[in-house]
């Protein structure tokens, strides 16, 4: 049980960090991109994808 919770937490943290990195490195110059227009959206999307990845593994 503890390993599963750690895997989910790690997936959320790593996914959020990658979402923020995507926002900073690729981003959106016009502000009209749905996922990377704001850092919060990038972090949220990345954290969700990380959680899905951790759940599937």
Image (cartoon, grey):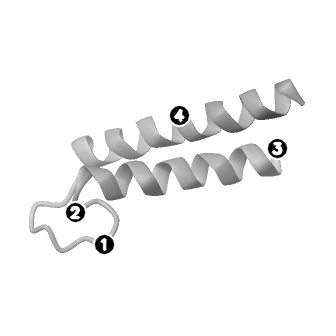
Q: Which residue is mark 2?
A: 37
Marks 3 and 2, how far apart at CA: 29 Å
Q: Which mark is residue 57?
A: 3
Give residue 17's position: percent from left, percent from top: 42, 35
Please identify the quadrant where the C terminus is shown.
Answer: top right
Q: Is residue 28 left or right of residue 8?
A: left
Q: Secondary structure at mark 2?
A: loop
Q: Residues within 10 Å of mark 4 (few under 14, many from 20)?
A: some
Residue displayed at 52% across by 42% down: 15
Residue displayed at 78% across by 49% down: 55
Of the two numbered discs 2 and 4 on the same chain, state the one appearing first in sequence.
4
Of the two numbered discs 4 and 1 on the same chain, state the one appearing first in sequence.
4
Q: Residues within 10 Å of mark 2 (few under 14, many from 20)?
A: some
Residue displayed at 34% across by 65% down: 35
Q: Secondary structure at mark 1?
A: loop
Q: Which mark is residue 34?
A: 1
Marks 1 and 2, how far apart at CA: 6 Å
Q: Are marks 1 and 2 in contact (CB under 8 Å)?
A: yes
Q: Which residue is mark 4?
A: 13
Q: Nearer the viewer, mark 3 or mark 4?
A: 4
């Amino acid at each position: 049980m503890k390993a599963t919770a750690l895997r989910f937490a790690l997936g959320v943290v790593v996914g959020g960090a990658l979402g923020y990195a995507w926002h900073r490195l690729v981003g959106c110059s016009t502000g009209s991109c749905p996922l990377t227009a704001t850092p919060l959206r990038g972090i949220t999307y990345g954290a969700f994808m990380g959680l899905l990845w951790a759940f599937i593994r």
